Image: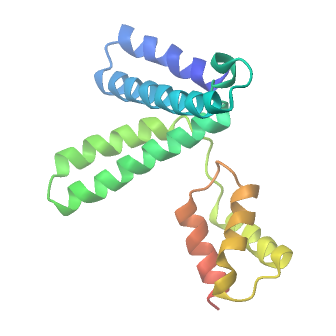
Amino acid sequence: MPLKQKIEAELKSAMKNKEELRLSVLRMLKTAIGNKEVEKRTKLSKTGTGDLEKESQLTDEEIMEVLRAESKKRKDAVAGYKQGGRTEMAEKEKREMEILQSYLPAEISESELNILVEEAVKATGAQTPKEFGRVMGYVMGKAKNRVSGDRVSEAVKAVLGK
């Protein structure tokens, strides 16, 4: 089942079960996906090719990008609320983030990430921190949607900073 259909089915389930927080998060997610589709359709309309409605539908990969972006917003909000002393709001944002992350594949382990970074360094021939971007690009391409950019960045800096 495509990810978008799964989200819509769970939205209906949350309505029936009166799960307010889950319903709220899924509605927000559906809106974010819709906004991304409109953005994609607008870009496609400028080229004027093909069936815009069909081509503007997001793939599961693109939906995962939306999920990551929304999850990152929640993570940033949690940090902001904790810094401001608003623990109840931080907890709410954290629960929302957990709901969003339940739709993402499990992240790769630290050891797998380190192996990927070492492989990237060898493949790109990077030796200095100036070549950070090439290594990041290689790792993100290999581990697409299974690791956050923050984790990759830290691992690459640790290896290239030696």
Q: Quadrant of residue 29?
A: top left
Colour scheme in use:
rainbow
Answer with left or right where residue 74 lies relative to residue 3.
left
Look at the image and tell me in which quarter the N terminus lies.
top right
| Point 38% across, 7% down: residue | 16
**Could you tell me residue 110's position as x and y percent?**
63, 66
Please name whichever residue, 107 or 60, is drawn nearer the observer in this view of the structure.
60
Q: Quadrant of residue 80?
A: bottom left
**Could you tell me residue 136's position as x and y percent?**
67, 68
**Could you tell me residue 36's position as x and y percent?**
52, 33
| Point 71% across, 17% down: residue | 51
| Point 36% across, 11% down: residue | 15
In the image, is residue 107 above or below residue 48?
Answer: below
| Count of numbered labels shown in the rendering | 0
| Point 72% across, 72% down: residue | 134
Answer with left or right where residue 24 lies relative to residue 113.
left
Q: Quadrant of residue 132?
A: bottom right
* The furthest residue to the top: 16
**Could you tell me residue 41's position as x and y percent?**
59, 27
* The furthest residue to the bottom: 162
Look at the image and tell me in which quarter the C terminus lies.
bottom right
In the image, is residue 83 above or below residue 145?
Answer: below
* The furthest residue to the right: 123
